[in-house]
Image (tube, rainbow, N blue to C red):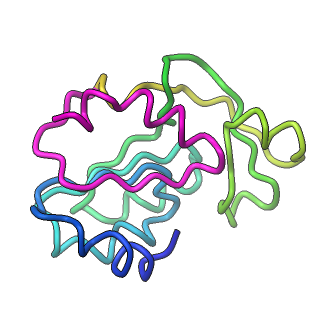
Amino acid sequence: MSERKVREWALPYVNTFNTYIDVGASIGDTSVPFISTFTNIICFEPNPNSYKKLLDFNELTCYNTALSDSEEEVNLIIPHQTNDPEHGSIAEERNSKWKGEQFVVHTKTLDSYKFKDVSFIKIDVEQAELKVVTGAKETIKK
């Protein structure tokens, strides 16, 4: 997902600009450009190396966790150097084919955070999107 895609494909359908949740935020490429657009931006990034880079932006609220449909410990695999974190995944379908740097990460549901006034959710988690949406049903309904 790119900033351009968010701007062109999604933002025209956003009616309010309260809270933006970026699931699979990486190093902030799809969060930082919208700091002045949304009142709050909340980022979820399980890769500890990417997460550290997100902390450079005080305007973002960041969680070093993966979102899913349950709470558990899973493997995050980065299929190339950890300083190039794109395409890391916790999805078993992906991980069965990938080799690379591995991290054990904790998953939670988006609903467990009980966020209010959510205007937009971007999810880019390399084949684990359905699990994220399943764990976000109540947030989406609100």
- Find residue 19 and report its horizontal and vertical position in percent: 17, 53
Q: Which residue is at a point 49% across and 64% down the rendered structure image?
A: 27
Q: Is residue 120 within the magenta segment?
A: yes
Q: Which residue is at a point 71% across and 31% down the rendered structure image?
A: 75
Decide: is 129 above or below 124. above
Q: Which residue is at a point 33% across and 69% down the rendered structure image?
A: 10
Range shown magenta:
113-142
Which image quarter holds the C terminus? top left
- Find residue 92 and report its horizontal and vertical position in percent: 76, 32
Q: Is residue 38 left or right of residue 11?
A: left
Q: Is residue 51 left or right of residue 138?
A: right
- How many discs appear? 0
Between residue 108 and residue 50, name the one nearer to us.
Answer: 108
- Find residue 133 and report its horizontal and vertical position in percent: 43, 36
- Find residue 44 and report its horizontal and vertical position in percent: 42, 46
Q: Is residue 31 within the magenta segment?
A: no
Q: Which residue is at a point 54% across and 43% down the rendered structure image?
A: 129
